[in-house]
Amino acid sequence: MNRRTFNRNIALAGAAAALSPFSMVRAQAQKLRVGVLLPRSGFQGFIGQSCQKGADLAPGVIKEMLGVDIELMNADTETNVDTARTRAERLIQEGAHVLVGAFDSGQSAAIAQVAEQRGVPYIVNIAAAPQITEQGYKFVFRNFQTAPDIVREGLALIGDLFRATNTVPRTAVFMHVNDTFGQAMAKGIGAFMPRLTQLPFKIVDTISYDPAAKDLTVEVSKAKATNADFLMLVCRLNDAIILRREMVKQRWNPMGIISPGSPGMYEEQFYKTLGKLSEHCISNVPWYNPRAELTKVVEKAFLKQNPKDKLVYHGLNAGFTFEAILIAADAFRRAKSTDAKTLAEAVRQTNIANKMMLGAPIRFNAKGQVEGIGSACVQNLNLTPTVVLPAAAATAKPVFPMPGYKKA
Amino acid sequence: MSLDLVVNVAIAGVLTGLVYGLMALGLSVIFGVVRVVNFAHGEMMTIAMYAATALFAALSLDPFLAVLPVAAAFFVLGYAMQAGLINPFITRPEHSQFMLLVAVAIILVNALLMIFGPGARNVQVDYQLESFEIGKILVDKARLYAALLAVAAAAALFAFFRFSLTGKAIRACADNYLGAKVVGLNVKKYYALTFGLGAACVAVAGCAMVLLVDVTPPLGPYYTLLAFVIVIVGGLGSMTGALLGGVLIGVSEALAGLFIAPSAKSMFSFGLLILVLLLRPQGLLGKKA
């Protein structure tokens, strides 16, 4: 055999191997590699770790549900937009078929750019800035409310809360974190408030603050000085803890602390750090349906993986992270391929009715956004996030004004 | 805007500024004598804060009582660090010293992340959420105690340098390296002593600071930067300048938050830094080179 014959035989053998049915079967049977990007360290570290619990239980539950094998490729964004971008790049280089994450709007927007450039499907678990699905991206999908949706649902629930408790607060001071999410929420509230004439209160002052703030003395002093009836708060976790402590130090007892839709006050760490001071804070947020079949399955898997923990403290974070991976797995099952375009097209055709979070079945619109995700009014009662509204899903009655409230 | 609101915020700014001042004092003392800029200063303070939280968790030791063991441990560590690590770099170019201490800072942050994880830690003492009420003025108890501790520690350090023989010897080493060697002073030993004192100073500041803020590993670089801003505003090498700079930064940040926007607080302190660098490059109480 001469050199030319040898080379031709090798080339033919390679082509035959590549085109053989055996090879194709192998491609179909491979695992779906899901790159999970979460802020597991930095000032969003606790929330990132909370989301991670939802990711960790997903492969087992989904294998049972859909028979799909999933390999998680975890990456820590360190609560940093640049790190999120570079970690997304690296996960794609290492062979991730789909990306999931990243809890924060700024980090998610950065990952979305990378995913779109590299043509890899990206499913946002939690991030509310509307622009993420307004860029005309073909590979970016979101199973979470946008900031305007959160605000609209959150403000409507505030009105429901006042009606349910026969209270009529006249003024609110609005405090919000000054990051992508906080600004989007502030913009949403500014747009919706004038239209919601049925709400009895007006916002007397708006105070923004650094999400990585270490001290909120000035901010709370300013808010207290407005003599507002209640505090409307768009926060994260650490700042919510600092702010609540500072309110106690400054002896500020408004009628209530109500979030129209932000993380922080229903997180496990909020209860652990503040104890009784966490009581009666209210968050109007997308939440899970405790009666859903899938919730029970997830709850069981969660307890198995975290025997000393409860799903209720991670409901939103773990729930939406799990659902994002479920969407990817469901698409992979239907597409029977890890090819990015085929997978993205399958994600676009998603229709999942057996879901965990409140709201309509998971279906993406032309922009890659799921519509019809519901919110609940979640109040901290007995150190547990408890659904108090809407009445159909409530497990307790709302407490408003907060005990200890003194009229200014 | 009411006057009592302004006074409340200004008082909080002064009290926080005094703790900032004590932190920066350690940096200023080290630079004033050893002529090495400690780029791991904030990271060292973060370790002191973790030490205070660990002692509180294990022994329920109030951070004010934890000051003694933590400061003593930091003195020994600081002495060892100067004697074993920094002294060989004293005569080397400044960029070598810079790289050395930046490397130390990075190692410290990552070690803290490995040991304690990324989550915030704090202490929950009985008086943490209490305030003194004087008319319409509310003074946060923990902040007041922390500021008093900072003043006491700064006064002790001033007295040490002013009245003790060792303090005078250290000042001699700072004033004239060659002269100090000629009269028989063991300059490197005094350098190590100074670094130990600076480290103890930052340990006291850390024990006070843990009452005011929750500690996380990434806090170190932030405090290093803040200490630099303070000592540059006050005058690098000037002990009184460090305290003054701390109070100025504390008050200006608080008032900027009140009158301009809370999210513009840091911007304002950096603006102040630029202003001082333009108008008085040696700092408010610094000497011209």
Image (tube, rainbow, N blue to C red):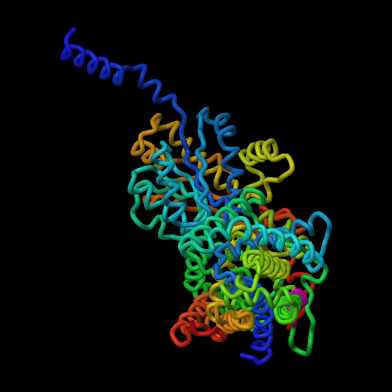
Q: Residue farthest to the bottom?
A: B3
Q: Which residues are magenta?
A: B139-148
Q: Main secondary structure of the magenta part?
A: helix
Quarter holding the N terminus of chain B is bottom right
The answer to if B253 sits in the magenta stretch is: no
Residue A356 screen position, x and y as percent: 59, 44
Q: Nearer the viewer, residue B242 or A239?
A: B242
Q: Residue farthest to the top?
A: A1
From the viewer's perspective, is residue B242 above or below residue A135?
Answer: below
From the viewer's perspective, is residue A229 above or below residue A29?
Answer: below
Inspect this view and state whether residue B274 appears.
Answer: yes
Q: Nearer the viewer, residue A162 or A21?
A: A21
Quarter assignment of residue A309: top right
Residue B190 screen position, x and y as percent: 66, 68
Q: Nearer the viewer, residue B44 or A86?
A: B44
- Relative placement, left or right, of A64 versus A191 is right
